[in-house]
Image (cartoon, rainbow, N blue to C red):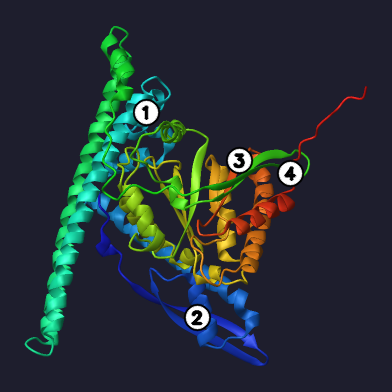
Amino acid sequence: MKPNKGKMCTRERDFVYKFNAGNQHLVLTVPLKFPVQENISHLHGRLMLLHNLPCFIENDLKQSLNKFIEEETIKDYDREAEMALDAVKSGKVDINQLTDTWAKAYKETTLEHAKPEETSWDEDFADVYHDLIHSPASEMLLNLEHNYFVSISELISERDVELKKLRERQGAEMDKVMQELGKSLTDQDVNSLAAQHFESQQDLENKWTNELKQSTAIQKQEYQEWVIKLHQDLKNPNNSSISDEIKIQPSQLRESGEGNGRIYEEQRLLEESFTIHLGAQLKTMHNLRLLRADMLDFCKHKRNHRSGVKLHRLQTAMSLYSTSLCGLVLLVDNRISSYSGIKRDFATVCQECTDFHFPGIQEQLEIVQKVVLKARAQRSREFYITRHSNLSEIHVAFHLCVDDNVRSGNITARDPAIMGLRNILKVCCTHDITTISIPLLLVHDMSEEMTIPWCLKRAELVFKCVKGFMMEMASWDGGISRTVQFLVPQTISEEMFYQLSNMLPQIFRVSSTLTLTSKH
């Protein structure tokens, strides 16, 4: 039975509060509309401010206001309940329909009377995939995923070429028009052409967006159905043809041409690894790595399916439904979108390969936007999370919201960016993320103000704070060994890199080896 909203009429009542101020006896009368929609704390604060009320009545006023609103609201509910009962007694409401509605609501909200939850398709698929990726069929899965990736990448390359040609043609048209500006053409003509160009670009981008969306949806459906069918076939001991197919599959790979400009260049990687033990009494071993690398290198797939690349992808796939997940921290502004900067680059990498397990990046961002609208007050201090099965070496991306203040040299351990890192590490503890990559300098790109003293000061701050957070981890998760990767931008000098490398063991007190020799 649907609630009768017509009965929820608005009523106005006076809240009366009496108090003494010296020899004066004062009365505060405030008309309130019921049901009260406003936050009571906000209403109380406004009354104190508008009426210039003395501070000594603040707590008592709030208690009286809360009590008055609660009592009057209960009276309204009682009145509506009486009206509902009268409607049942008079026959205005169907008693059978009412009991059915109550029974349904009771089953849905009371666990012991609810029907047992059926396993969802996503859970079934996750279990099946986990079984297959840990079986000889893993090669088959990875090869199919790779071929799908190549197909989508080629489609994106075609889109980029078509958009580039359109922009070049439009640029030539605009140059001609600008040459005639003030002669045979006016500003209005230029604006009209610019509007036409923009509309043409939008139409072409929308066309390719829809085509990519359709292609990824088809791939996802085909892949999931194929995985389920393969799992069922492998359960049949008499089906020897499937085993033969699994043995043949590794050589059946699509390779794309490398002349289309979408192959990512591999620059020289600088890397230092350390082992540390943290904890007061029961110490836990952790692995630390310092790398000079692009953060997105941990996300990008390579088209040439070399053995090293394949092993990385296999490890990521095998740990997808495990207690050893890999995470990454991206520094973004507080606008939840994928239109500019590293957000756009990350979204581009995500869209190059179909995600067969989680919603696409755009769909996840739309969900985050809806959540943020409900928690707008904390938006500037929050990070948001996206899940991925289609990236090279990570499963989880932490999008840490920062502002231009991180480029200054005076941030402290209480800065929102630092506290954001602490909360991210806490999420890692509670959600089985055992490897996390962090931008050491809290920037992804170097700029002129980031001098050597600036870099050393920032690195020292982050190292010390992360060490403290890692020591807290023992109380959060009982002391689980983790890997923390500190990344610095690729444009940083080797000299600076090795200065940072020397700083790390001094702060973390890296474990040193002890060589025992016997005396003769």
Foreground label between 4 and 3: 3
Compute the Cα span from label 4 to label 3: 13 Å
Compared across the picture, whether 102 is left or right of 208 comes to right
Indicate which disc, 2 or 1, sits on the residue closer to the N terminus. 2
Instruction: Classify 445 as above or below 181.
Output: above
> For the residue labelled by badge 3, is the local secondary structure a helix, a strand or a loop?
loop
Q: Quadrant of residue 194?
A: bottom left
Q: Disc 3 marks which residue? A: 482
Q: Disc 2 marks which residue? A: 46
As drawn, the residue found furthest toward the bottom would be 23
**Residue contact at pointers 3 and 1, CB within 8 angstroms:** no
Residue appearing at x 11%, y 87% in the figure:
186
Indicate which disc, 4 or 1, sits on the residue closer to the N terminus. 1
Which amino acid is tagged 2? Answer: Arg
Which amino acid is tagged 1? Answer: Tyr
Instruction: Classify 5 as above or below 311.
Output: below
Between 409 and 516, the residue placed more toward the observer is: 516
Q: Disc 4 marks which residue? A: 279
> For the residue labelled by badge 1, is the local secondary structure a helix, a strand or a loop?
helix
Compute the Cα span from label 3 to label 1: 26 Å
Between 224 and 457, the residue placed more toward the observer is: 457
Compute the Cα span from label 2 to label 4: 49 Å
> For the residue labelled by badge 2, is the local secondary structure a helix, a strand or a loop?
helix
Instruction: Classify 11 as above or below 396.
Output: below
Mark 4 closeness class: few <14, some 14–19, many ≥20 residues within 10 Å: some
Q: What is the count of numbered marks? A: 4
In x, y percent, where is residue 10?
32, 71
Residue appearing at x 46%, y 82% in the figure:
30
**Residue contact at pointers 4 and 1, CB within 8 angstroms:** no
Q: Disc 1 marks which residue? A: 129
